[in-house]
Image (cartoon, rainbow, N blue to C red):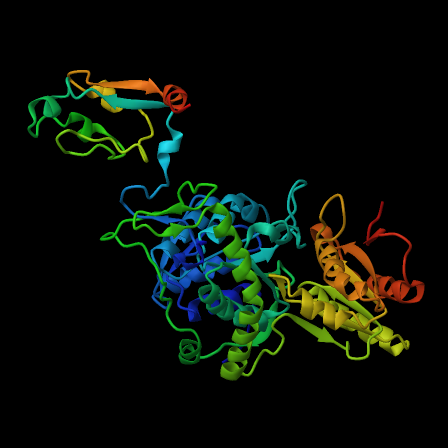
Amino acid sequence: MHIIESGNVAAALGVKLSRAQVIAAYPITPQTPLTEKLSEFIESGEMEAQYVPVESEHSAMAVCIASSSAGARAFTATSANGLLYMHEQIQWAAGARLPIVMCVVNRGVGAPWTIWNDHQDSISQRDTGWIQYYVNDHQQIIDGVIKAFMLAEEVMIPVMLCYDGYLLSHTYMPFEVPEASAVDAFLPPYKPAYALDPENPANLNTVTMPDVRLDAKGRLAHGYMEIRYLLQEDLIRTIDVMARIDESFRKHFGRGGSPYYETYQCEDAEFIAVSLGSLSYHLRDVVDMLRADGFKVGVMSVHLYRPFPAEAIADALAGSTGIVVFEKALSYGYQGALCSDIKSALYHKGVDGSRMPFVHNYILGLGGREIRTTDLCEAFRKSCTEGAAPTDELRWLGLKI
Amino acid sequence: MGTRQYGRSTSHSEPGPGDAGRTGSWRVVRPVMDPSICIPAKRGTPACFICWLYCPDGVISRTVPPAIDYEYCKGCGICAEECPTKAITMVEEACFIQDKE
């Protein structure tokens, strides 16, 4: 069914179609309409799930951890400071290997207090062991939620599906809502290999010694380091699994084909802009404008940010002359986190003596600062004409200081 | 041999001796039982077993005489505190290290 609705409703419909069994969430702008919609679905009987109203985001994630440990398909959503309030439980969910799905409706973080969009909230959770997937429009939100449950349950790693606050959450766009029967055919019910069982009590993730140990049955059990190694190993494996799930989704629904990143006009591009989220669609207009002026430019939108598909991204970017990373977040004291990751991915392309593209980094749109198309166009044009910079200078766009 | 074959990717323990690791290494004082004072040891019959009942780690056997599993005994001293005949004495682990030397 083709409908026109907001991004938050697209996410809620995706959660309903995925037949999530437990929803625990605390309202925070701009996520609120998503969880309100889910509570409406449950209250009206349209969705068979338990909605657990909690007193905080920390508790929301704790409920998701508990229900997922008991074998339920669990979902939550948050934004900004709510996400940060969860931080300890976010790490726990990853270490406990629970396939929770969470929508992060991207918003800037305080202080100073802001309710507007940037990416600092989810970028600050980059190293928690969760899968992070950034989407660019309403169709990708609803499809992304469904794929996220499948991915999480296949690799037993939780997924953050990140989409821009207001720009996507509160705007209305047409999108296709898949048939429930089609989603059921794609996404089977969650059947965990292990779930809490009162008949066979167990302690999960209690104090784990630095070294390995023989368990009560005489088997050599992991120490802390082995468990953390397996998380990393499975995250790396997730890169291939994501491609497989995207392909399966494409066969079922006819949409997909870009599991790691989405490119526009990159085939012959000498200069490629890179960004996360809806900004990359904004940059498509900029690409069209610069192409009209004779610049061979393109734009890459990174979907899968953690695990970082470094090889695929480096392969796609290495042939260009210059890369311009536009970011709505910053690793304070250095540069944009995505920019650092892209440079790191390109490193092995340089060591064999082949040509290395220059990388420029623009920080923009923090706390909802307006991103003007003309500013983007001038910045990208400047990078194309100036070429390699002598230093890692961080450039700010739209700053009025 | 490593833990690759363990079959889980998390930390998981079930009720049973030693599923928290060799907690005996935590011990700084060791409970030592004197069989000439311990009731079941002295009588040669199943009796008392208050140490077995109170041990929070279940490392004392309900046998004649009772035995303490030092692999897992953390040395908390509850058995010595509860023993009605004061048959259990808490001895510094350092004494045993000196003995070995």
Q: Is residue A189 visible?
A: yes
Please tell me which residue is depicted at 49% across the width and 82% down the height of the picture. A252
Q: Is residue A169 visible?
A: no
Nearest the viewer among B18 and B93 is B93
* Horizontal arrangement in the rendering, residue A15 relative to residue A332 (left or right): left
Nearest the viewer among A256 and A97 is A97
Q: Is residue A277 above or below residue A70?
A: below
Name the outermost residue toward the top. B86
Image quadrant occupied by the C terminus of chain A: top right
Please tell me which residue is depicted at 77% across the width and 66% down the height of the picture. A349
Which of the 4 image quadrants contains residue A267?
bottom right
Name the spot of residue A73 as percent of width and height, x first.
39, 62
Q: Is residue B75 above or below residue A180?
A: above
Please tell me which residue is depicted at 7% across the width and 23% down the height of the picture. B43
Name the spot of residue A359 as percent of width and height, x first.
82, 61
Please tell me which residue is depicted at 79% across the width and 73% down the height of the picture. A298
Q: Is residue B60 above or below residue A105?
A: above
* Horizontal arrangement in the rendering, residue A67 relative to residue A32 (left or right): left
Nearest the viewer among A369 and A132 is A132
Name the outermost residue toward the front. B101
Name the spot of residue A313 as percent of width and height, x first.
70, 68
Nearest the viewer among A241 and A166 is A241
Name the spot of residue A21 as percent of width and height, x first.
37, 62
Mark count: 0
